[in-house]
Amino acid sequence: MTIFYLIRHGETEWNVTGRWQGHMDIPLNDVGLAQAQRVAERLREENMHFDVLYSSDLQRAWMTAQTIGTALDIEPQPQQALREIDLGTWGGRTRAEIQESDPETLARIDAGEDLPRGGAERITDLRARVVSAVEQIATQHRGETIGLVAHGGTIRSLLAHATQGTPQALGWGQHIGNTAISVVIRTAAGWDVSVINDMAHLNGTDQAPDLMSTPPGDAEQV
C-alpha cells in the first residue's frame, strides 16, 4: 500500500483579496508562513516520515514544502505537474473582474460546462495532468509514504480520482483549507480516501481559517 499525504499551501495575499492565482507565482504572506510552520510542527510531533516529498514548483507551495522538509529533514522535489489549474488570462483577476470581461464563459461554467478558464485549462485537463503524474509516482514509490504539497484544485482532482467520481460529484467547490491535510491510499485494488481537509494544527491559533468567509466554487483556485 502506498500512502499519499496531500497538503495544500499556506495563505497568500491573493487568497485574502480573492484574486485567482492559477499559475501566477505568488508567495506566502505572513499568515501563510505561520500556517506552514504549524503543519510542519504537527507532522514532526506525530513522527511523520515521508520517503519522498514532492511539491508544485509554484512558490506558495514550494515555500510550504521547504518548511515541511526542514522539519522532517527531507529535501522537497519540484513537480510542475502538481500546479493549480492554468487560468490563462483570468490569472490575477477577481471573480467580479472576470464577470465584467467574460460574463458568457463564466455563466456557462457556473451552469456546469467544463470550459477552458481564461483560454487555458479545463477541470478535466487539470485532472488528467495531475492524475497521470501521481499514478507515475505511485508506481515509482510503491509501498512508500509520500508527501505532496500542492493546491486546492490539484487536491480536489486527486480526491475525485480516488473516489472514482467527477470533481463535480465530489463537490468542486468543496473547501480545501490552507495547509489542510488529506490522505489517499493506493492499493492493488485501487484508491481509498482516508482523510479530507484536516486542519487540526490550526485550531486555537491566529492562523485558523474563517470558513464562513471562504469564497465558493472556482474562487478557491486563488
Image (cartoon, rainbow, N blue to C red):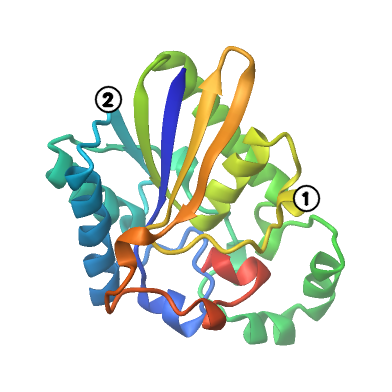
Badge 1 marks a residue whose secondary structure is helix
Tell me: 169 left or right of 161.
right
**How many callouts does the rendering have?**
2
Query: Which residue is identified by label 2?
Result: 51
Tell me: 112 left or right of 32.
right
Residue at position x 24%, y 31% from top? 49
Location of residue 103 (image quadrant): bottom right
Query: Which residue is identified by label 1?
Result: 169
Q: Could one spot residue 29 in this view of the protein?
A: no
Badge 2 marks a residue whose secondary structure is loop
Residue at position x 60%, y 68% from top? 89
Q: Say which of 65 and 40 sits in front.
A: 40
Tell me: 25 left or right of 177.
left
Residue at position x 38%, y 62% from top? 25
Instruction: Give the mark nearer the N terminus: 2 vs 1.
Output: 2
Pinpoint residue 27: horizontal percent, then vertical percent: 30, 66
* Disc 2/disc 1 C-alpha distance (Å): 32 Å
Tell me: 50 left or right of 200.
left
Q: In this view, does 195 lie above or below 17?
A: above
